[in-house]
Amino acid sequence: MADQKLNFNSRTIHGGQKPEETTGSVMPPIFQTSTYAQSAPGEHKGYEYSRSQNPTREALEKNIASLEGADYGLAFGSGLAAIDAILKMLEPGDEVISTNDLYGGTHRLFNSIFRKYGIKFHFVGMDHVSRVSEKVNAKTKLIWVETPTNPMMNVIDIQAMSKIAREAGALLVVDNTFATPYLQRPLEHGADVVMHSATKYLAGHSDVVLGTLAVKDQEVAEQLYFIQNSSGAVCGPMDSFLTLRGLKTLHVRVQRHCENGRAVAEYLRKHDAVEAVFWPGFEDQPQYEVAKRQMKDFGGMVSFRIKGDQFEDASRVVSALKVFTLAESLGGVESLAGHPASMTHASIPEAERAQTGVSNGLIRLSVGIEDVDDLLADLDQALKA
Ligand SMILES: *Cc1c(COP(=O)(O)O)cnc(C)c1O
């Protein structure tokens, strides 16, 4: 594709895009239609029914593929619908090795839905490569990586995981939601599939729920298109349009998210009321070298633990914030604060949560692109509360 020659900051705008043919419309129209006229049975323009193909969704799928350096892109009704499609490639008896510190909804989908169908999951701390290789056997079909992880911001070595996956004949999938392709392109490090909750940074404006996959291999892509059409968890044209619109400013937004994220992480680390700060950009952080190798910068997600690690204290801080909104989700232009133990990660059993560090005093920030001084002042007043 010619636009693969463009640099990333141009591909957000032009990747896979062309003016619409009948009118020259620069933005792809919202093709709000379920079906398409045929001139004779089976004679059509490549579009039959909008579950199978829709031009607005296709424009988004091409853009996603371009951004991740993939040949194929797929868009779904949510991030979880995209994950669901990948898991449907497996069969009863197959095994999955997944990071243990992962998005609560992904954990629930694996453990409560797909386990019922005879798929076995091993959740391990992937910051130690040996913990993954120990679990590999002939039944290992999928290695699931989320990096940086949610909410502990652990960084997993994609290259090391791709080596294990290749040797095992398993597929390596990376949930790239936190990093975005602006910061990290897992296919360049050996992953087979990149998954996004586009709900977060890709769409970027907290106004849409959508998921995407980017795939290198044709055979894998064909299987996934078959599942997308057979299971039918597609996104609508309006949401495809909103995501495309958001993507055009991805590089500009994420650059600012990174600047503000760094300022917030450094501020919190010096604060007396804060016990620990989790952000991949600290040089004394154990996975700093890996983060530096596979990421362009360190993103806008910052977690921290309040001194004493009490729910009441964390609750008081997040409730006192005024510029940060207390809400689930992340990656939008506005700053959000969350309490993982009671919000996004409540579906993970407490013992398992504690093991990964998601304790009662942990607060997760999605640092937005407001004026950084307003964000720091807000944290300052809330931490005094
Ligand atoms: C939100 C999120 C998901 C799930 O995506 P939805 O769009 O909410 O279905 C998966 N992974 C990560 C890392 C997320 O933050």
Image (cartoon, rainbow, N blue to C red):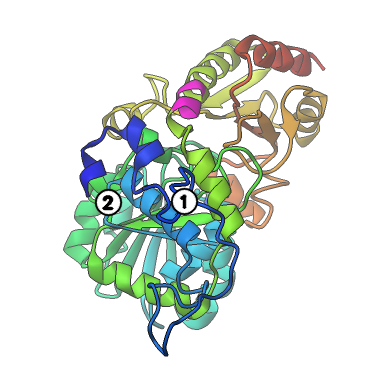
Q: Which residue is depicted at the point 82% across and 24% down? A: 320
Q: Is residue 190 visible?
A: yes
**Visible residue check, residue 355:** no
Q: Position of residue 165 (x, y in %)?
A: 24, 59
Between the residue at mark 2 and the residue at mark 1, the CA separation in whole angstroms equals 47 Å
Residue 310, picture quadrant: top right
Report the magenta residues as a range.
252-256
Is 255 covered by the magenta stretch?
A: yes
Q: Residue at x 45, y 23 (%)?
A: 255
Q: Residue furthest left?
A: 167
Secondary structure state at the residue bearing disc 1: loop
Rendered-image quadrant of the C terminus: top right
Q: Is mark 1 within 8 Å of ligand 1?
A: no
Residue 87 % position (x, y): 43, 70
User: Toward the viewer: 32 or 212?
Assistant: 32
Identify residue type, mark 1: Thr
Image position of 332 (left or right of 214): right
Q: Amino acid at mark 2?
A: Met
Quickly name the residue at label 2.
161
126 above or below 267? below
Name the chief secondary structure element in magenta.
helix
Residue 228: x percent and y percent?
A: 45, 72
Mark 1 lies on residue:
23
